Amino acid sequence: MTPTPLTLVIATRESRLALWQAEHVRAQLQAHGHTVTLLGMTTKGDQILDRSLSKVGGKGLFVKELENALEDGRADLAVHSLKDVPMDLPPGFSLACVMEREDPRDAFVSPRYASLASLPHGAVVGTSSLRRSVLVHALRPDLRIEPLRGNLDTRLRKLDEGRYDGIVLAAAGLLRLGLAERIRESFSPETMLPAAGQGALGIEIRSDRQDLFAALAPLSHETTWMAVNAERAVSRGMGGSCSMPLAAYARFDGGRLSLRAAWGDLVNPGTLVQAEGAAAVTTLSDATVLGETVVAQLRANGAH
């Protein structure tokens, strides 16, 4: 049965990438007969650029203002990069849709160097992700890793101004904005394990909006949702936040979902604990169980 056409407002951050993501969702909803407008907003995460997220409140800083707009009725749905969405949403909110994943890998960007391996000893690499910092350190302990905050365009500008020899970003954002030519190297997941949910878009709504669950159902991508559910189960089980270097990535091979996770020790930066598992997964609950199994392995291997 076709859902009744709705008039909807999407709450979105105002960065170029966030607006692209919101426009992408708007186009798909309009193709299903809905009328959609955007409500652009600036979040605290966009405003605080002089400190790392782990020091000022974590990923929730990117979604709180959007949730306020949902709560008071100014907007009907919010579009997020799923890796920015806290593992547990506040009461009254639901993740109603996960869309098909873009490239989940991390990308190395540099105006002068073709790869991370080609950087000279002591070169400066920019990232404010603890996960990326730990994984880059594991690959090249001789490099200097410096903080890099701001939206994607701001990060590229800081690189082009010569503040860094190279930076590491999510490939998905570059691809979505037509900036594939900036990518000098895409890291395989085996080399640099992605963040939970990286490359996927999630749509958040108020839990009482049953009409929106129906309207968003055609936009959901089942295998992506199961994969990221397993990844987010790892983050949830480890208490994952911006203050913990944690990676988790799952992909289907036939009917089985393979999940790898890695945890870095901030006290001993050279320590990288890894775990993996695989299972036949056909439901979100199956994916959660797989994630919890990998968490148990991580802890058994020394993660804490």
Image (cartoon, helix red, strand yellow):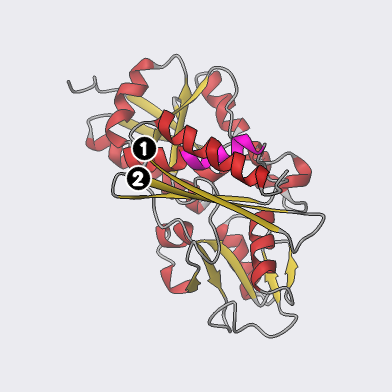
Q: Is residue 237 magenta?
A: yes
Task: Specify which label sits upstream in the sequence, 2 or 1.
Answer: 2
- Give the image location of residue 274, x and y in percent: 61, 54
Q: Quadrant of the C terminus?
A: top right
Residue 29 seen from this side: no
In what element is the residue under mark 2? strand
Between 48 and 301, which is closer to the camera in this rendering? 301
**Picture layout, residue 275 above or below residue 202:** below
Please, what is the three-letter code of the amino acid marked with disc 1? Val
Percent coordinates x, y for residue 303 in the rendering: 70, 47
Quarter occupied by the N terminus: top left
Q: Which labelled disc corresponds to residue 281?
A: 1
The location of residue 276, given as percent across then percent down, is 52, 50
Res 280 quadrant in image: top left
**Principal secondary structure, stretch drawn in magenta:** helix
Element carrying mark 1: loop
Residue placed furthest toward the right:
267
> In this orientation, which residue lies closer to the viewer: 58 or 28?
58
* Position above or below: 33 against 271: above
Residue extending furthest front?
300
Badge number at residue 256:
2
Res. 125 image quadrant: bottom right
Residue at the top extreme of this rendering = 208
Q: Residue furthest left?
A: 1
Question: Which residues, given as a range, are shown in magenta?
Answer: 230-238
Mark 2 residue type: Arg
* Residue located 48% across and 52% down the image: 17
Task: Report the residue at 54% width, 58% height from top.
Answer: 193
